[in-house]
Amino acid sequence: MIIISKRIEDVMGIFIFLLLTMAGVISQEQITFVRLTIIVLKAFIGYVIFWLLGIFISDILLKTILHSVEDHQPKARKGSLLSDFGTDKNGDLKKIKVEWK
């Protein structure tokens, strides 16, 4: 679960970083060192924002969805209701001499 969460965070952040970097480089303006620095800073800020969003999506929502899924298979009843009791409860019933057939 932790590995899946970290991969979702990393993929979202890296995708946005590369997307913003490519959009800045492909733009019509002349590329200078100052312009390239601004492009990389914007891409890094986008990476951090989407990395945090990835934490929210993967960590909170994914765990909530997976932990809220319940096992809807009914238990198969075999024998009487005493078969559902643990051994300590069966032992208590044997002490008071209750016999079930």
Image (tube, rainbow, N blue to C red):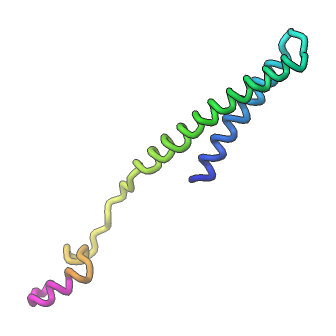
Q: Is residue 9 magenta?
A: no
Query: Considering the image in quadrants, where does the C terminus appear?
Result: bottom left
* Side of 74 relative to 9 (left or right): left
Q: Which contiguous range is marked in magenta?
A: 90-101
Please state the horizontal and vertical placement of residue 16, each as a whole percent of the image: 71, 29
Q: Tell me where residue 40 sits by quadrant.
A: top right
> Residue at 25% of width from left, 73% of height from top?
84
Residue found at the far front of this picture? 34
> With 82 as the anchor, is 15 left or right in this view?
right
**Front in this rendered view, residue 21 or 41:** 41
Query: Going 19% across and 73% down the picture, which residue do you hit?
Result: 81
Q: Is 15 located above or below residue 7 in the figure?
A: above
Question: In the image, residue 20 lies at what x, y percent?
Answer: 75, 23
Q: In the image, 85: left or right of 52?
A: left
Q: In this orientation, which residue lies closer to the viewer: 101 or 97?
A: 97
Q: From what the image shows, is residue 72 above or below residue 48?
A: below
